[in-house]
Image: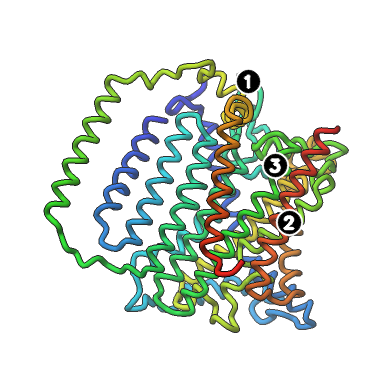
Amino acid sequence: MEFLILGLPLMYYAAMVAKVLAAFVFVLLTVAYATYAERKIIGHMQVRLGPMRTGWHGLLQPIADGLKLFFKEEIVPSQASTFAFLVAPLIALIPAFITFAVIPFGGTIEVLGYKIPLQIAAYYDTAAHQVFDVNVGVLYILAMSSLGVYGIVLAGWSSNSKYSLLGGLRASAQMISYELAAGLSIIAVFMLSGTLSLNRIVELQSGMGGFEWYVFKQPLAALMFFICSLAEINRTPFDLPEAETELVSGFCTEYSSMKYAMFFMAEYANMVTVSALTATLFLGGWNGPMAVAIPLLGPVYFIAKVYFLMFVCMWIRATLPRYRYDQLMHLGWKVFIPLALANIVVTGIIGYII
Amino acid sequence: METLFFLIITFVVLVSAILVTTCRNPINSALALIMTFFCLATYYVMLDAPFMAAVQVMVYAGAIMVLIVFTIMLLNIRVDAAKKHFHKVILGSILGFFTLVNTLFLLIKGQSAQPTGPYSGEIIKQIGHTELIGKEMFTNFLLPFEITSILLLVAIVGAVMLAKKKI
């Protein structure tokens, strides 16, 4: 006789809490050390050393930065719309984190005879002997990323400052245009997989010793999705909304202290999410050699892929200059959207022939 | 478990829906409306219609509300001058009352709790809500679907014509 709370076994709750905590701590730690890694990597690429003073090779730098931001004065501009000004950082931060609920970061592991799929919004049905997860996982992610716009738009508008408003407007125009292209480019993946569940998509990529990745079947879609995602999360070379040199960091000009830190965290959390999503959709998720036989290898492969993609983001930042605004719009609407549509048609035709 | 969750969500929906009408600042009203739409999406999830939920968030909370927020921002409507028009309140109350009566009547007399047609709850769960919508849309409802897409295309072309000075 199992011990039940509200009709579900106790292990169910324990597994859920453990998974949520693990994913949350992973994202938070990654966000903290991504700032350090970014400064170090860009430093070395530009033949500098990067942070060196705090701790061994500057390893304590993120903690020092966090403390500094925490003790700074909170300033709310007197002409700002207070409520919108206060909630904007939260609205930016929350979608970045909750996207992680549907991303599978490992296979199914067994603890005390209870099977736990390593994906937050999933459970193992003992009667049906299969894992149930959110069966519209990809749509969920697209929906959440469309909510991320509000944080930036509201921040730009409510600060009641010219630079912020311009930054906010740029950000929203850019995010809305590239959301379309990103959405269209993953349609080709659905056409191959025939499902919207991320768990199933990862399973379908497990052939050929864990290397049957969609990036080999859909290289164009993978490239477009990654670039569009970079634009959607306002990373270089598409960081026009923040453009320090022209807009004095855009929508977050008026923010200080922890609220500024929240925007900063949102940016890096978005980077983690986008890397995780690209890894899941195109790089086989947690698949790899021996991943099915040894379930604990799954998260290792997944984290390795995520970190590799994050490294690519930083590499791009160190290498490429910023786009001009009209070039950005041209690239989004006149290059990526037609290419994505053509990719869908070609995938459809090839799928019909084979 | 589901009842508890339903009650929490319903509480949030009601509070945010009341905030939509009572907030003095139009942007705050719009934010409350986004929250209402978001919570409505969770109702769809509870009704085994995850696709509808995702589309609700994407289209209503994501796209339409962005447009509304933009309009409010660009018109720069700040806090309303707080003029209370008595006749508007009375008219609104009468309309609201009749809508309430109408809804209650439908809820009590209607048969909407039982799904009709070939797709019962079990079949939807087994095959998948998204797949069924796609199948129906591209077989039985192909003609309306195509007509809608042509209508949308016409609207887009019209919008471009209106916005561009020289083509």
In front of the other: B116 or A145: B116
Image coordinates for residue A301, horizontal then vertical, percent: 77, 48
Secondary structure under tag 1 reads loop
Image coordinates for residue A266, horizontal then vertical, percent: 55, 63
Q: Residues at badges 3 and 1 in contact (C-beta under 8 Å)?
A: no
Q: Quadrant of the C terminus of chain B?
A: bottom right
Is B104 on the left-hand or right-hand side of B140?
Answer: left
Same chain for marks 3 and 1?
A: yes
- Residue behind mark 2: A224
- Residue behind mark 1: A128
Secondary structure under tag 3 reads loop
User: Can residue B143 be seen in the rendering of this structure?
Assistant: yes
Question: Disc 2 and disc 3: Cα gap in Å?
Answer: 26 Å
Q: Quadrant of the N terminus of chain B?
A: top left
Q: Label 2 neighbourhood size at 10 Å, few (<14), some (14-19), many (20+)?
A: many
Q: Label 1 neighbourhood size at 10 Å, few (<14), some (14-19), many (20+)?
A: few
Question: Disc 2 and disc 1: Cα gap in Å?
Answer: 38 Å
> Which chain does the numbered disc 2 sit on?
A
Q: Residue at x 68, y 67 (%)?
A: A330
